[in-house]
Structures are given as C-alpha cells and as structure tokens.
Image (cartoon, rainbow, N blue to C red):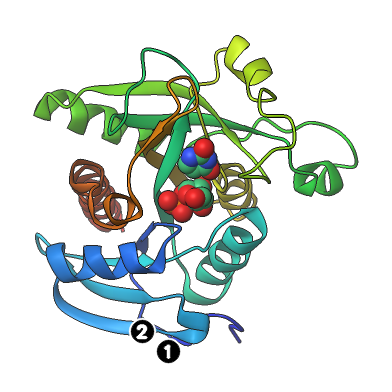
Amino acid sequence: MSTHIGAQPGEIAETVLMPGDPLRAQFVAENWLSDVHQYNNVRGMLGFTGLWKGERISVQGSGMGMPSMAIYATELMRFFGVQRLIRIGSCGSMQSEIALRELILAVSASTNSAMNRSRFGGMDYAATASWNLLRKALAVVEEEGIPFHAGSILSSDTFYDDDPSQWKVWARHGVLAVEMEANQLYTLAARHGREALALLTVSDSLVQEKELSAQDRQTGFHQMVEVALEVARRAQAEASKTE
Ligand SMILES: O=P(O)(O)O[C@H]1O[C@H](CO)[C@@H](O)[C@H]1O
Ligand SMILES: O=c1cc[nH]c(=O)[nH]1
C-alpha cells in the first residue's frame, strides 16, 4: 500500500516527470498533456497522468529536499511499477558562465546529505544519471539547438546556509549548480534497477546574486518541460517496442 500517493494500480504511467513544486506539476499537466486525470492530492502533492504525443506520461510533485523526494520516488517505483523518473527542477548556478533560465543536464549529483552515508555505512557513492535518459536528452537538445550545460551538480540538504560562501568549494571542483533532490533520485533509481535523470533550469545565480520570481519558477520553464517530455516519449516508445 502506498502511504503518500493515493492512486489505484495502473493510474500512473511508466514514465514520470517530477518537479519539486506540485503546482508546477499541475501547470505541466494543464498545458502539455491531453486526457488528463489527477490521481493524487494526498498532502497537496499533486499527481497527474495524461497523453503526450500518444504516450502515457505522469507528472508528480516530489516536494523539496531529499527525504521528500525519497518518499515519492520509492512509492512510485515500489507500488506503481514506475520505470523512468525525470526530475524537472530549478537550481542555483555556481559558475559565472551559467546564466538565469539556462538548462542543465545533471550527469551526476554530489551531496552534503547524510542519507547515503547511512545507506553505505560511511562510504561514498557516486550518484549518476541513467545513461539511456541522458543520451536521449543530449540528442533532443542538440536536434532542437537548445543551449545547455552538462555536468555534475550538488544536491544540498539546505537552501539557506550559515556560511554564505560554503558553495564555493563545490564550484572550485567544477560543480555547475545546486538543487536539493537529484542525489537521492539517482541513488534510489539505481537501487530499484530503474532509470532517472534530472533536468534543471537555473532560477538563481549564486555568483551574480540574481534570481527569478516565484511565479517564474512555477510556470517559466517551458523549454525544460518540452525536453523532458520528449525524452520521456522516446524512452517509453523504445521500451514498448522491446517488450
Ligand atoms: O524547483 P524545485 O524542483 O522544487 O527545485 C529546487 O527548488 C527548491 C528550493 O527552492 C528545491 O526543491 C530545489 O531542489
Ligand atoms: O536548491 C536550490 C534551488 C535553487 N536555487 C538554489 O540556490 N538552491
């Protein structure tokens, strides 16, 4: 039984887009999917299933932070058979050449969280995107001529840090941006033998100290949503051919 997702078996597609913000999930469902059905409203963490170019796709809010993402990702995989999870999130740029609104493909996700330290008995795990989803995303952005950055990101437990320059150690090691969920999404997908990818739009710059509005974060990420839907469509179509 699923504690936090009130769906019936079969109501959730095999591929799920996951924004942190449940209202971004609603925005995606209302603006891109057809024949939409809302399957979840438990705790207001909205989830929808609909059609995108003939493929059945779901979009489910994850909430903010790795414990919340871990709950939703686990339930989607364990109770609803979800095979592919594509995060569509916002992030803060740590590099001067990465500007507001630009797209990042998160190849790997370091973390300051203790969740994997606990899972791996103090050892470090390299949380990595699914190669299959990553190469599909790369193909989509190259075909569409969409500017992008690909590389490592940081999944942080904190949005507000006591030390305002703490992020710089990650920046010096080539980390592109900070967000709060991908590390656990990648870890749990690997644990369940499923595929995961995080696509991120830069909502603020730690370097330039600039940020988008809350409204922009909810509704302003069209390019990322369209890349994610196309990756989802291609991955799902490919999987159903081989079944
Ligand atoms: O815009 P979302 O997907 O929520 O992602 C980012 O925004 C939230 C912080 O404002 C965190 O969840 C972070 O990962
Ligand atoms: O987690 C996040 C998301 C956006 N911007 C940040 O600085 N951190």
* Placement of the N terminus among the 4 image quadrants: bottom right
Tags 1 and 2 in contact by the CB under 8 Å rule? yes
Residue 194, how many percent across, how many down? Answer: 50, 52
Q: Is residue 126 visible?
A: yes
Count every numbered label the image shows and give the total: 2
Measuring 54% from the left and 62% from the top, which residue is drawn there? 73
Classify residue 9 as left or right of residue 152.
Answer: left
Q: Nearer the viewer, residue 20 or 80?
A: 20
Picture layout, residue 186 above or below residue 138: below
Residue 35 located left or right of residue 11: left
Three-letter amino acid code at the position of disc 1: Gln
Residue at (36%, 84%) from the top-left corner?
A: 39
Q: Position of residue 127 (x, y in %)?
A: 62, 35
Asked whether mark 1 and ligand 1 are closer than 8 Å, the reply comes as: no
The image quadrant where one finds the C terminus is bottom left
Residue 128 at x, y percent in the picture: 55, 33
**Is 212 located above or below residue 192 in the figure?**
above
Residue 39: assigned label: 2
Q: Which residue is disc 1 drawn over?
A: 8
Q: Quadrant of residue 146?
A: top left
